[in-house]
Image (cartoon, rainbow, N blue to C red):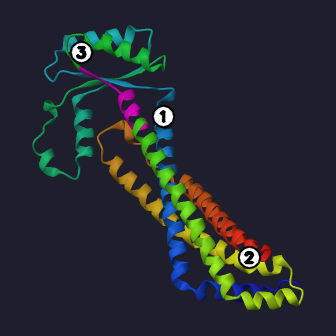
């Protein structure tokens, strides 16, 4: 028997609306499982971006005392300038620090009113020649001993914390996503099996008049594939929303380490495309197994 487009559309639509509550439950389960998977991919991508930014240029910041003298500033500056282990050095004066401060607290005018430029410290931003974390920490520790130095802030501390958190959270979300995906596949399997059972007499008649297994199987697989695609489409909205939340939250933090955590829209679209493929695969697979088991019984 040849496939006709109108037959496929009609049969797939009838199958979807024959048991709407089960179809909606299946779609929502797929959406939840793929949203969790997309969230795990977002977190992993965000941490990868941070690691890549600091892979070749792992910075540390030398914060000076607020009441540092000009002689102490020049001494630290000379040490860093003359060091063969410093790749790049930049001095951040009080005006620049105050400008950054105003940008970070732009939404909190009550805080801005309490702080003046002369109350903020100056600093040196240092990029070492060697990106080895242990080497950088040793270099920063030596600078920290100099007179007039308040603190040396290492980027690797934040990076390690982010990596540790992301690994744990990504593993948890991926486990939850896989568990939800299995639940979605099983629910889809039961949904299609129910539809097949409801049409068992019609299917038997079709087999008697010569319909092939694939002629019977295709509409049900299209139903499962469509359920998977709809669930995946809903999950894409959740992933975009989560990425927007990342962008807003980390954008408000006064830390240069987190500024690249939010994933670019093009990468989110790529993740969305991947989720659509996974949703379609789950739907078609669950439906195909359900119909095949019935036809082979």
Drawn side of residue 220 relative to residue 135, left or right: right
Q: Gap in Å between the C-alphas at discs 2 and 3?
A: 81 Å
Mark 1 against mark 2, which lies toward the viewer? 2
Q: Earlier in the sequence, mark 3 or mark 1?
A: 1
Disc 2 and disc 3 in contact, CB within 8 angstroms? no
Q: Gap in Å between the C-alphas at discs 3 and 1?
A: 31 Å
Which residue is under mark 3? 73
Q: Residues within 10 Å of mark 3 (few under 14, many from 20)?
A: some
Q: Gap in Å between the C-alphas at discs 1 and 2?
A: 51 Å
Q: Nearer the viewer, residue 267 or 14?
A: 14
**Mark 2 falls on what kind of element?**
helix
Quadrant housing residue 67: top left
Q: Height in image: 158 above or below 260?
A: above
Which residue is under mark 1? 51
Q: Estimate the x, y position of residue 122 in percent, counting from the top left.
A: 23, 25
Q: Nearer the viewer, residue 270 or 104?
A: 270
Range drawn in magenta: 151-163
Q: Residues within 10 Å of mark 1 (few under 14, many from 20)?
A: many
What residue do we see at 82% from left, 89% from top? 206
Looking at the rendered image, the quarter that the N terminus falls into is: bottom right
**Mark 3 falls on what kind of element?**
helix
Q: Nearer the viewer, residue 79 or 257?
A: 257
Q: Estimate the x, y position of residue 51 in percent, counting from the top left.
A: 48, 34
**Dominant secondary structure of the residues highlighted in magenta in the image:** helix
Looking at the rendered image, the quarter that the C terminus falls into is: bottom right
Q: Estimate the x, y position of residue 123 in percent, counting from the top left.
A: 27, 24
**Mark 1 falls on what kind of element?**
helix
Which residue is under mark 2? 294
Drawn side of residue 45 relative to residue 245, left or right: right
Q: Residue furthest front?
A: 297
């Amino acid at each position: 028997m040849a496939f006709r487009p109108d037959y496929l559309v009609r049969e797939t639509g009838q199958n979807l609306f024959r048991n709407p509550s089960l179809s909606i439950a299946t779609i929502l389960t797929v959406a939840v499982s793929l949203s969790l998977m997309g969230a795990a991919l977002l977190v992993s991508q965000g941490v990868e971006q941070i690691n890549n930014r600091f892979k070749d240029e792992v910075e540390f910041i030398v914060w000076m005392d607020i009441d540092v003298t000009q002689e102490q500033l020049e001494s630290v500056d000379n040490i860093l300038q003359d060091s063969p282990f410093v790749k790049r050095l930049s001095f951040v004066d009080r005006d620049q620090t105050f400008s950054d401060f105003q940008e970070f607290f732009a939404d909190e005018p009550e805080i801005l009113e309490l702080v003046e430029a002369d109350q903020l410290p100056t600093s040196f931003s240092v990029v070492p020649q060697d990106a080895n974390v242990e080497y950088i920490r040793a270099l920063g520790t030596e600078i920290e001993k100099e007179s007039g130095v308040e603190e040396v802030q290492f980027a690797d501390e934040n990076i390690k914390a982010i990596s540790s958190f992301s690994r744990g959270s990504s593993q948890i979300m991926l486990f939850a996503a896989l568990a939800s995906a299995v639940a979605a596949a099983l629910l889809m399997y039961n949904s299609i099996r129910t539809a097949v059972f409801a049409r068992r007499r019609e299917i038997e008649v079709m087999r008697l008049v010569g319909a092939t297994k694939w002629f019977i199987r295709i509409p049900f697989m299209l139903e499962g594939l469509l359920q998977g695609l709809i669930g995946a489409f809903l999950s894409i909205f959740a992933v975009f929303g989560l990425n927007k939340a990342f962008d807003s939250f980390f954008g408000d933090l006064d830390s240069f380490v987190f500024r690249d955590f939010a994933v670019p829209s093009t990468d989110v679209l790529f993740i969305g495309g991947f989720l659509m493929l996974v949703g379609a695969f789950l739907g078609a697979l669950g439906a195909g197994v359900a119909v095949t088991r019935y036809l082979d019984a």
